[in-house]
Image (spheres, rainbow, N blue to C red):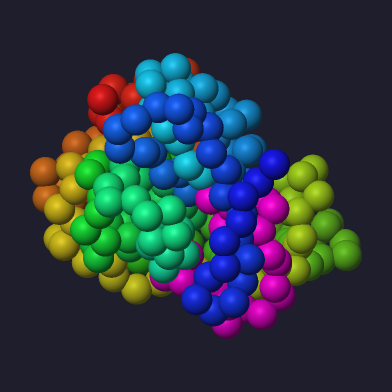
Amino acid sequence: MANHFKTSDGLTLAWHEWGAEHGGTPVLLHHGFGASAKLNWLAAGVVAALTDAGRRVIAIDARGHGESEKPHDPALYGEDRMSRDLSELIDHLGLVEVDLVGYSMGAIVALITGARERRLRRLVIGGVGDGILARGGVDTRVVDNRDIVTALMADDLSSVSPSALPFRQMADATGADRKALAAQAQVVHAEPIPLDRIIAPTLVIAGDRDPLAAHPERLAAAIPGAKAVITPGDHRGAVSKPEFAAAVVAFLT
């Protein structure tokens, strides 16, 4: 059963916990667009790898996702707002320090958080690359967020952009609220993130067949002291490969 907390703008968001019996710095996880804590982290084996390593794990369901509230107003979305949700969850739990892991949309949220949140011990960024430098968020050179909105709301999928179709297919497969996802897709982060302000040691992980995470070494080079590793897999599959979880555990140990 999920736990819940109220954000400063009045939404009720869900969070999940595993390994509560473990001490030390908790690991906070933020999932990707269209996914959820259970889908992105539990089903992928990342939670098990972390708890097996003796870590307490906390994962949020972002607004519009999973078991969290799902408004349809784009003004209530954006990775910057989701970053504030993370800080408010840290406040709610009374944590003095966390390790933060984000994937895809969650990686953008984590980078924004890393640039201003001083309670981070370590930071892991997955599923993004130099699109962060070029676009300030999701790599719209690969898939246009406007095409994602169209795909999510279309009645006829025959005219949907092939690059955006997987987002619709995933939403249908998981029973997601497509209007809520479209609201987020309308306001994706698209301005420079002050990566030079990140002081937590940072790892960038990218799948070797992930077009949305091209040139992760360029992203790592823009973050003080960061390093990049390549693991097997495409954008949806890399996070579920054992090499991904192993890299996260090794870096956070």
Residue depicted at 70% across the width and 66% down the height: 70
* Residue 24 pos. (x, y %): 30, 33
Q: Is residue 243 magenta?
A: no
Instruction: Give yes or no for residue 69 being in the magenta stretch.
Output: yes
Residue sticking out furthest to the right: 155
**Could one spot residue 150 in this view of the protein?**
no
The main secondary structure of the magenta stretch is loop
Occupied quadrant, residue 220? top left
Q: Quick one: 90 or 147, which is closer to the camera?
A: 90
Number of numbered discs visible in the structure rendering: 0
Q: Would you identify the image quadrant in which residue 205 lies?
A: top left
- In percent of width and height, residue 65 lies at 65, 56
Q: Residue furthest left?
A: 225
Q: Where, quadrant-wise, is the N terminus in this rendering?
A: top right
Instruction: Answer above or below: position of 233 versus 114.
Output: above
Which is nearer the eye, 93 or 63?
Answer: 93
Q: Is residue 105 left or right of residue 55?
A: right
The vertical placement of 120 against 26, above or below, is: below
In the picture, measured across the screen, residue 172 lies left or right of residue 20, that is right
> In the picture, which quadrant includes the C terminus?
top left
Determine whether, in the image, residue 57 is placed left or right of residue 224: right
**Residue 228 spot, x, y in % from top left:** 25, 35
Q: Is residue 105 visible?
A: yes
**Highlighted magenta segment, given as a residue range:** 60-82
At 38% from the left and 19% from the top, the residue drawn is 53
Q: Nearer the viewer, residue 25 or 188?
A: 25
- Residue at 18% x, 42% y is 201
Give percent across and percent down for residue 116.
Answer: 25, 65
